[in-house]
Image (tube, grey):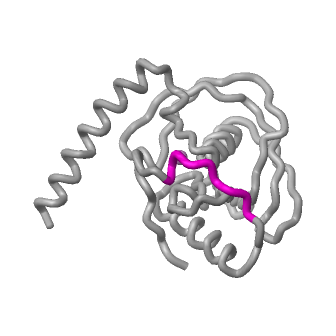
Amino acid sequence: MAVLEIRKYPDEVLKKKALPVENIDRSLQRLIDDMIETMYAAPGIGLAAPQVGISKRLIVIDVSLGEEKNSLIVLINPEIMDTEGIADSDEGCLSVPGYNSTIKRAEKVTVKGLDRNGKPVQIEGDEMLARALQHEIDHLDGILFVDRMSSIKKEFFKKKYLKKSAVCSQESAVRR
Ligand code: NI
């Protein structure tokens, strides 16, 4: 297993609509294991394949951050089947480090997909799990949480965030 590099905004791969997984083979199993390790190492509660540069419909989630044995979810080709309610909550993303915002999402979701062995599964989530499922599935459609902010807020984010990351990369270039 390996910790993969997490792509950061405004990387182009994060804006692409990912393609469905067609073969559940050994290389996909390796990718799943690497994504799980990368998520725990970050640490984060979810990771979508485009975040490691692979434009495929695959997500991993563990809202317990590895604390509870049965809370790890691997979903191939996930689809939201049903939603209920609306909730506001603070959200962040491993691809947009150092930035958080309140995002409106469905309170509960029902998602179907395949597990890592290709078996059809259906997952119902509320609270943090519902939010994580929606956030990660958004990644597969090239949508980041900042895309769900108001346009004024997003413009402000773009100016401020890109300026800040330019300064950071200059600083690290100097250090090297
Ligand atoms: Ni994210």
Give the prevailing secondary structure in the magenta stretch. loop
Residue at 35% across, 32% down: 158
Left or right of 122? Residue 172 is: left
Left or right of 172? Residue 57 is: right
Residue at 56% across, 49% down: 16
Count the numbered circles shown. 0
- Residue 146 on the magenta segment: no
State the image quarter where residue 124 is shown: top right
Q: Position of residue 172 (x, y in %)?
A: 18, 58
Q: Is residue 38 above or below residue 101?
A: below
Residue at 80% across, 63% down: 115
**Which residue range is magenta in the image?**
13-21
Q: Position of residue 93 (x, y in %)?
A: 49, 45
Q: Position of residue 100 (x, y in %)?
A: 43, 35
- Residue 19 on the magenta segment: yes
State the image quarter where residue 65 is shown: bottom right
> On the rendered image, what quadrant is the N terminus found in?
bottom right
Residue at 67% across, 40% down: 134
